[in-house]
Amino acid sequence: MKIELATTLTNVALASAQAQALEIAVAVVDAAGGLVTFARTDDVSPQACVLAQTKAYTSARDRQKSGSLGQWAKETGKDMGYWNDAKITGIAGGVPIIKRSTVIGAIGISGLSEQDDEKLALQALNSAL
């Protein structure tokens, strides 16, 4: 994950949120889930700051949207503790960043509804890639 791409994704997401007067936190991680960039709007909740990072981490580590993992766990009856990793979440808003069929990282957004978090993450990806 190059810092330039992570910064672009972060800035695109923030600009979109600010244009709509929305409060969000956005995190971009590398393929292993290591934090590359993080930013937040002024009045976003502290919990959204934590969730943005865990959503991105989950998506990068599991190579799928964080909400898809949550749906799978629900459908199979698996507890989120199944992964033995306290940073794993099934809350939607984390989306993998894929280049040439390889997950190079993920973006996580929090502060809105789960569906709107994921939608904004996808918009940022579509704008930057």
Image (cartoon, rainbow, N blue to C red):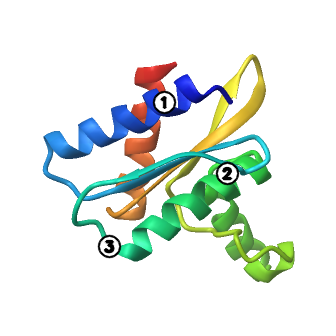
Q: Disc 1 vs disc 3: Cβ atoms closer than 8 Å?
A: no
Image vertical order of residue 32 relative to residue 115, above or below: above
Q: Position of residue 114 (x, y in %)?
A: 42, 62
Secondary structure under tag 2 reads helix
In the picture, residue 30 is in which quadrant? top right
Secondary structure under tag 3 reads loop
In the picture, residue 112 is in which quadrant? bottom left
Give the mark, 1 or 2, whose residue is nearer the N terminus: 2
Q: Disc 2 vs disc 3: Cβ atoms closer than 8 Å?
A: no
Graded by Cα atoms within 10 Å as few (under 14), some (14 to 19) or many (20 or more), the crowding at tag 2 reads: many
Give the mark, 1 or 3, whose residue is nearer the N terminus: 3
Image vertical order of residue 107 relative to residue 92, above or below: above
Which mark is in front, 1 or 3? Answer: 3
Residue at label 2? Answer: 59
Q: What amino acid is found at the position of numbered circle 2 in the picture?
A: Ser
Give the mark, 2 or 3, whose residue is nearer the N terminus: 3
Residue at label 1? Answer: 125
Image vertical order of residue 40 relative to residue 20, above or below: below
Q: What amino acid is found at the position of numbered circle 1 in the picture?
A: Leu
Can the viewer see residue 67? no
Q: What amino acid is found at the position of numbered circle 3 in the picture?
A: Ser
Measured in 3D between alpha carbons, the distance from the residue under mark 1 to the one under mark 3, in whole angstroms, is 24 Å
What quarter of the picture does the N terminus occupy?
top right
Q: Position of residue 108 (x, y in %)?
A: 52, 51
